[in-house]
Amino acid sequence: MRAAHPFRTFIAAAAAALLSAGAALAQTPVRIGVIPVIGAAPIFVAGSEGWLKDAGLTPTFTTFESGPNMIQALASGTIDVYVAGIAPLAVARTKNIDVRVVASTAVEEMVFVAGPKLAPYFAAGTDKAAAFKAFRDKEGRAARLATQPPGSVPNTTLQHWLWQVAKADKPNAEVVSMGIDATQQALLAGAVDGASIREPALTIVQMRNPAMTLVATGGEMFPDQPGTVVAVFGAFADRNPAAVQGLVNAVVKAVDLLKSDPARAAPAVEQALGKGITDLATIRKALSSPAAKFTADPRAIVEATKKMQTYQVSIGTLDRDVPIDGLFVPGFYEKAVAR
C-alpha cells in the first residue's frame, strides 16, 4: 500500500481545519434574558445537555428580577431572547416592541403562600375574604402581601386571586411590590404576611419554615394561568430563523426530559438557580411540585393570555387590550414536534 503524499496530507489537514473553523463561525451568538425560577428550567437544561450548541447557538445568559425589567433590556437591544412571564409582553406590544412567543415552558406557576402569622386565619373551609378580614380585625392592619412589580405575571395573578376569586375587601390586603429574592427573604423574615411565589421559592420557604402554608394553587389563582414563555426579539428572529428553530427544538427536548427524567435534569437546574442558596435535593423536590407544570406548546396558553390581558386592562397595568395576532408564532414549535 502506497504511503500518503506529504503535500496531500497537508492539504487534507488544512481542509479539515477550514471546515472546523467554518463550523465554529456558523455558531450564532444568542443573548438570553431569564428569570431565575423553575419555570425557566427548560432553557437551563437545553444549555447543559448541549442541545443549544448542537443547534448552532452560542448562548450567554443574563438574570433579571422581573419580566418588566427584562422588557427594557429587550427594547434597548441588549438581549435577543426573553424567558419570563407572558404578561409583560402585552405591555411591550403597546410600546411597539416587536417580540414573538415561540414556545411556552410552564403553566400555573404562581401560588399564594401565607406566613406563620397569616396562615392560621385560613383554616380548612374558611372563606378567604373572611380570613383577610379576621386578620385585619385582630392585627389592626391589612395583611402585607409581596409580589413582583405591576404588569408582571406574579402581580397580575395575585391581584386576580385577591379581588376576583377570594373577593377580599381592598382595605384588608396590601400588595407590596419587590424583586424575587426580596420577596422570598421578606416572607422568611416575617416582613410580609404572605406572597405570590413560584418554585423553587415555594419549596425553599416551606423547608425552612414548615409554618408557611400553601393557600392557593396556580389554577385557583388564575385558571389555566399562562406562565413562563420563550420569546424572541423580532429583528433577531428575522435575521436568524434557523437559530430560532434550533432554540425551540432544544426547548421541546428539554421539556420532554423534565417530564420523563427530572432526576437527570435537576443538576442543570440546580447549577443555574442554586448559587449556594439551595441544593440539589431542594431542586429535585421543586421539580415534582404542584407548581411545576412544564409544557412547550405556545398554543396552549393563547386563550388564557387574552383573559390575563383583559384583566390587566381592568386594573390599569395595561392601557388597552392589544390584539395578540403576531404575538404567538407557533410554527417553530409545530416543526419541532413534527421532527
Image (cartoon, rainbow, N blue to C red):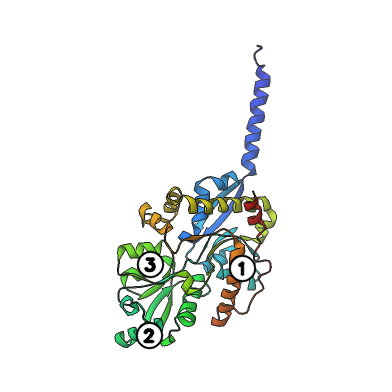
Q: Which residue is mark 2?
A: 130
Percent coordinates x, y for residue 318 in the rendering: 58, 77
* Inter-mark Cα distance, 2 to 1: 34 Å
| Position in image of residue 120 (x %, y %) | 30, 77
SS for dot 3: helix
What percent of the width, then of the height, locates residue 204? 36, 62
| Residue 142 in sight in this render | no
Q: Estimate the spatial distance between the alpha carbons at disc 2 and disc 3, rounded to whole Å.
A: 26 Å
Badge 1 is on which residue?
302
Q: Are marks 1 and 3 in contact (CB under 8 Å)?
A: no
Q: Looking at the image, which residue is at 67% across and 50% down?
A: 242
Residue found at the very far front of the displayed protein = 125
Q: Amino acid at mark 3?
A: Gln
Location of residue 114 with respect to 60 vertically, above or below: below
Report the amino acid beneath label 1: Val
Q: Amino acid at mark 2?
A: Ala
Residue 181's image quarter?
A: bottom left
Q: Which residue is mark 3?
A: 184
Q: Residue at x 37, y 83 (%)?
A: 132
Nearer to me, 147 or 76? 147
Q: Is residue 226 visible?
A: yes
Q: Position of residue 68 (x, y in %)?
A: 53, 69
2 vs 232: above or below: above
